[in-house]
Amino acid sequence: MTIDFEIIELPSMPNAMGKASFWYGQAERKKWRKIIALHKLGKPYEARIAMPVQNSKLTLVRCSSREPDLDNLYASFKFVIDALKFNGVIADDKPSVCKMECRWEKAKQKSGMIRVKVESA
């Protein structure tokens, strides 16, 4: 099974969250849960996929005008990965269950987006 989609929005970078990271993180978490549910699944926020991918391989690509450093690249996908788990797309995000690759690609300014690919491993 393969799920592959693009979202024309960028997750926030951890460095951009600043000192209000707890409240900002709560809002960001809810936002990405809804985006994943409505954009990809086409279902209401509370709906889940019946059978999550048990052993998954995630390929996450951030397309933006500025290249992030490696730790911020991976951290920027935290809420996206959590939303995939929350919506039942993947069973878990532990390294023993989910292999992950994050990449960056150059995009024009104000044309940022992410690409998400979930495969059965």
Image (tube, helix red, strand yellow):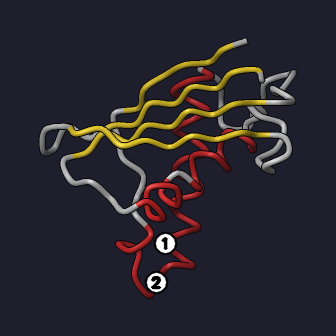
Q: Which mark is residue 10?
A: none
Residue highlighted by disc 1: 24
Say if 13 sits above or below 16 in the image.
above
Q: In this view, does 61 lie to the left or right of 30?
A: left
Dot 1, crowdedness within 10 Å: few (<14), some or many (≥20)?
few
* Residues packed near mark 2 inside 10 Å, few (<14), some (14 to 19) or many (20 plus): few
Furthest-top residue in this view: 1
> Which residue, given by chain and number where applicable, does mark 2 sit on?
20
Compared to 117, does 9 lie above or below? Answer: below
Q: Quadrant of residue 50?
A: top right
Residue 43 point in image, percent of width and height: 65, 24
Residue type, numbered disc 2: Ala
Q: Do the residues labelled 1 and 2 touch (CB within 8 Å)?
A: yes
Judge whether 84 appears above or below 89 on screen.
below
Q: Is mark 2 on a helix, strand or loop?
A: helix
Residue occupying image coordinates x 56% and y 29%: 38
Q: Where is residue 110 in the image (x, y as percent from the top left)?
A: 16, 44
Residue 78 placement (x, y as % from top left): 59, 55
Give the residue type that dot 1 points to: Tyr
Quarter of the image with the N terminus is top right
Of 117 and 71, the residue lying toward us: 71
- Percent x, y of residue 112: 26, 41
Query: The residue tagged with tag 1: helix, strand or loop?
Result: helix
**Quadrant of the image for the C terminus?**
top right
Q: Residue at x 54, y 47 (%)?
A: 32
